[in-house]
Image: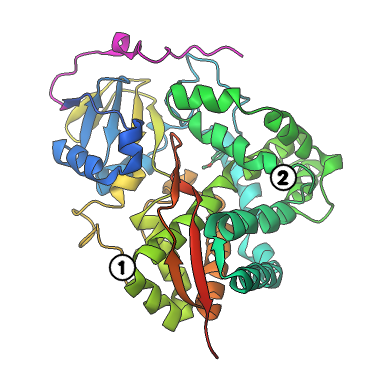
Amino acid sequence: MKFTQPPEGEYEKHIVPVKGVSSLNFDPYAAEVLTNPYPHYEELREAGPIVWLERYGVYVVSHYNTVRDVLTNPDVFCSSAGVGLSNFHTEKPWRQPSIILEADQPEHTGVRAVFARILSPRALKKLTTTFEAEAETMIDRMLENGECDGVVDLAHAFPIKVFGDAVGIMNEGREHLLPYGDMVFNAFGPVNGRFKECLANLGPATEWIYEACKRENLTDDGFGAAFYAAADAGEITHEGAGLLVRTTLSAGLDTTIFTMGNALVNLGRHPDQWAILRDEPKRARAALEEVLRYDSTFHSFYRTTTREIELEGVKLDKNQKVLVLVASANRDPRHWTEPDKFDVTRKATGNMGFGAGIHGCAGQMIARMEGEIVLRTLATKVETIELLGEPSLHFNNTVRGYTSMPMRITAKKH
Ligand code: OVM
């Protein structure tokens, strides 16, 4: 594999002075930033709706309205050049591009329609009882033990089981899903130490994913089989069907796993907010939405300009990468009241956690369903959540979450 991005330390070459726009040396991928990005995002928003990042030679947009404008103008801010820092027009992608994520209209349109039909609310409804039963089993087991790990025992275990089964992949080897996703999401950022270490430790994960996506290795009643049936019907190619399975396995695990972990951490840290949810479990969906706003799993991705364009008074060249900081949009006081307050009673819909526009998360319905079921089952069964020490943060170039969260939970008395 060859990477044509400049290695770490050589980004200086990319510095181009740009007139009429704030220019910062800010590194959104620095460990210190990932530890607590929100004060940094505030500084960035204060510097302006669009800022030049010297280190990477890209613009960054961090205000809610600007993020939305970029995401809802896909003809100007395209995805086919990749949605990471790497520009597919000039650099070789680390893997074959996704036919849904890294594609533009008109090719994207039909593929997205097939994907949306197969993950439609009707298809998802059939999965509800299975998902609920699994959440109950896992949470009952945690309650029996009292002391548990919220990430390992629930946030990780639940999507690996229920989403893996829903796609229809083999049981053997599912431990490769998370490391593969980690690579996918690191690869949207720079080729930094984090990227290289992840790649070096990837082992057989990529090969396993490739095998898992093959028709003969899928159950005959999952999303995977449905993608291949769409190929039989001539709606997509058979290679495309395999790539859509790969999309579910790339985008569907780390994201939901981290989201559930972020929910547990934030509810553990805000006992008043947990009490509100626990007393009214039907608030689960709204609480999940607030988690997605307040501590977004997805922090950033890129778009690439298809022509010269003026954005917030700044003239952008053609073929220019723009970093879209959705997690900052979700904390923008120009849009939200008291954005830094975790408040499960607020109306957090309209947050940019799933993006927006034609590329808005295609799995958001099943992601919300998984999260809602887990939070509702917790709220129904659990009285108290006590974090035992600091949860361990996972460092990734694109997504935010935890790898471990020791906690003690007690059962509700009925
Ligand atoms: C894909 C893909 C991978 C990662 C994320 C994603 C957020 C999609 O392979 O299509 O959407």
83 displayed left or right of 31: right
Residue 359 picture location, percent across and down:
48, 43
Among the 4 quarters of the image, the one containing residue 59 = top left
Question: Magenta part mainly helix, strand or loop?
Answer: loop
- Mark 1, Cα crowd under 10 Å, few <14 / some 14-19 / many 20+, is many
Among the 4 quarters of the image, the one containing residue 222 = bottom right
Of the pair 135 and 410, the residue shown nearer to us: 410
Residue 250 picture location, percent across and down:
61, 40
Where 83 sits versus 2, above or below?
below
Decide if residue 393 is in sight here. yes
Q: Residue at x 41, y 49 (%)?
A: 356
Query: What amino acid does circle 2 point to?
Result: Arg
Q: CA distance from mark 1 to mark 2?
A: 35 Å
Decide if residue 244 is in sight here. no
Of the pair 227 and 2, the residue shown nearer to us: 2
Magenta segment boundaries in residue numbering: 1-22
Q: Which mark is residue 343?
A: 1
